[in-house]
Amino acid sequence: MTYGIGMVLNGGLVFASDSRTNAGLDHVSTFCKMTVVETPGQGVIVMLNSGNLATTQQVVSRIKQHAVDADKPLTAHASIFTVAELVGRELRKTILTTTNEAPEQGDVDFTATFLVGGQVKGEVPRLFMVYPQGNFIESTVDTPFFQIGESKYGKPILDRVIQPNISMTQAIKCALVSFDSTIKSNLSVGLPIDVAMIKTNDLQVTKRHRIDSEDIYFRDLRSSWSQGLRQVFGQLPDPDWLK
Amino acid sequence: MTYGIGMVLNGGLVFASDSRTNAGLDHVSTFCKMTVVETPGQGVIVMLNSGNLATTQQVVSRIKQHAVDADKPLTAHASIFTVAELVGRELRKTILTTTNEAPEQGDVDFTATFLVGGQVKGEVPRLFMVYPQGNFIESTVDTPFFQIGESKYGKPILDRVIQPNISMTQAIKCALVSFDSTIKSNLSVGLPIDVAMIKTNDLQVTKRHRIDSEDIYFRDLRSSWSQGLRQVFGQLPDPDWLK
């Protein structure tokens, strides 16, 4: 499985994704699931993917090839919306082609989901979730984050904390806590975690960081969070009906 | 959907389940998903169910009828293991019969899952998870809790807190926090919550309580937890790579 988060906040965009790919528990590999395309001053686009690895790699390659063929970078699109459209078309096409060419593999899931976000010059930062069917939805102030992959374990803390007006630092910390919960409860999501932060109008990745198992900050964060939770839990009132 | 938790601890058994049943969002009803059979001094059995409501109601009715036919209560079984076997057999039979009798309903999911736990005289408290296939697994000291239904949102806190040696009060509070996270993130799980606690060797339900939307304690617990989480979150260190 995979776990990926994208957020669009007043301050800009935050992305985080894990790197574990598995086809059964004895076939676990590390693949970066975050693709960044940037032309500083012109625009920056981040894609996170979950689902069938062959499908997602093919889609990413095709989109890159598309830019080469058209002889203009992906960031030259006038809107992130048209990039999401492009991803949707390629995704749908790849899934259909693979499924039709291998009808005997009826029980293999070739589907995938993408988060596509970023900012191009002249437009505000935007974030889309692209479904295997090729259609997509856009993040709004009411729904400032999207998740892909193994999303349920880490959703409660995002629901509590993420609002458009929180700081980028708070948002990144919240994403990491969400990853902590997911990693604790699900073996198939694992380190390293790729984090990217894009401040509004920077038109390039402001900060990119990879958190691996040696990362001292993430270890501190996990233990502070765990201790804090236990402390809060220990202070909860007892039910009167148990007295 | 449904959410249900069963735990077997040193002090005894704890069960909690929600009461929301839905077939689409406009067809939401309240049904108790906790069935208690007790013969004080002889034994007590608790069943929680998730899945197709027609299936689970049929299984519960059949098991009760089984006891009437055999002219001995369910608690007269020498072991909770044989009760789990009985539930597995009836569950498998019900699903097969319904599916075979309505082949045109191929896209309807008639499956269900049960938690079966309790204590009969002469045996320790035991807890089983019975699958739609009719087979089952038993809870151990390494895995002191089982969840059914919409289990992922509320799993992280259980993973952190539930150990066989925690008190029954702590266990019940943890179950309620787990419900809080689930209710916050998933519309299809809702109040009231049924809670049952069975102390080891009590051979009857020690405490049973229903938490509805008017429950002041649960409201306090939710707000204390929420405030506490925010406070802990606010005190987390900032990443050095963001400074």
Image: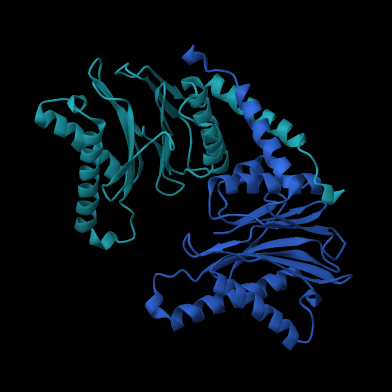
Chain colours: A cyan, B blue
- Compared to residue A170, the image places residue B212 above or below, namely below
State the image coordinates of residue A24 (x, y, percent, origin top left).
Answer: 43, 49
B82 vs A155, nearest the viewer: A155
A144 vs B177, nearest the viewer: A144
State the image coordinates of residue A216 (x, y, percent, origin top left).
Answer: 56, 20
State the image coordinates of residue A75 (x, y, percent, origin top left).
Answer: 21, 25
> Looking at the image, which residue is at 76% across and 76% down?
B74
**In which quarter of the view is residue A124 placed?**
top left
In the rendered image, is residue A223 in sight?
no
In the rendered image, is residue B55 in sight?
yes
> Looking at the image, which residue is at 32% across and 16% down?
A202
Looking at the image, how many numbered discs can be counted on the residues? 0
In this view, which residue lies farthest toward the front? B214
A163 vs A219, nearest the viewer: A163
> Looking at the image, which residue is at 49% across and 21% down?
A167
State the image coordinates of residue A77 (x, y, percent, origin top left).
Answer: 18, 28
Q: Is residue A52 left or right of residue A227?
A: left
Q: Is residue A127 left or right of residue A231?
A: left
Q: Is residue A71 left or right of residue B63?
A: left
> Looking at the image, which residue is at 68% across and 78% down?
B63
Q: Is residue A21 left or right of residue B95?
A: left
- Compared to residue A182, the image places residue B88 above or below, namely below
